[in-house]
Image (spheres, rainbow, N blue to C red):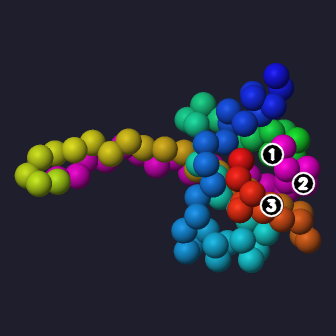
Amino acid sequence: MDKIHLYDKILSPMLTEKTTNLSEHNKIVFKVPREANKTNLKKNIEKIFKVNVIKINIINKQNRKVVKRGKKVNIQGYKKAIITLKKGQSIDLTTGI
């Protein structure tokens, strides 16, 4: 039952060119729910992946409006967490969450 609650704090890993470059510096980027905070994320990541988390930076992306085909569309905002791991440790994102 505890595993279900641990995985609720991580929605998905973000795999872009920029986040791939960050992995060289022992940093991993995850999309997290809006209610997530640093202390809960640190505990959950350490329990799930069995790594040591040094630092967590959280970025809150706001909602924005875009014009598509002449109509205004709202794009939902999200929160992402940049997690710095201890030197020499890594998380294999290819295995899935």
Would you name the residue on which mark 3 appears? Answer: 91
Q: Are marks 3 and 1 in contact (CB under 8 Å)?
A: no
Q: Nearer the viewer, mark 3 or mark 2?
A: 3
Residue 51, label in figure = 2
Amino acid at circle 3: Ile
Dot 3 or dot 1: first in sequence order is 1
Determine the secondary structure under disc 1. Answer: helix
Dot 2 or dot 1: first in sequence order is 1
- Report the residue at 85% width, 56% height from top: 54
Say left or right for 72 vs 20: left
- Residue 39 visible, this orientation: no
- Report the residue at 90% width, 70% height from top: 87
Would you name the residue on which mark 1 appears? Answer: 45
Amino acid at circle 1: Ile
Highlighted range, magenta: 48-67
Say left or right for 64 vs 34: left
Residue 70, label in figure = none
Determine the secondary structure under disc 3. Answer: loop
Dot 3 or dot 2: first in sequence order is 2
Q: Are marks 3 and 2 in contact (CB under 8 Å)?
A: yes
Measure how far apart labels 2 and 1 are at the Cα level: 7 Å
Q: Is residue 26 above or below residue 81?
A: below
Measure how far apart labels 3 and 1 are at the Cα level: 10 Å
In terms of depth relative to the viewer, which is nearer, 16 or 58? Answer: 16
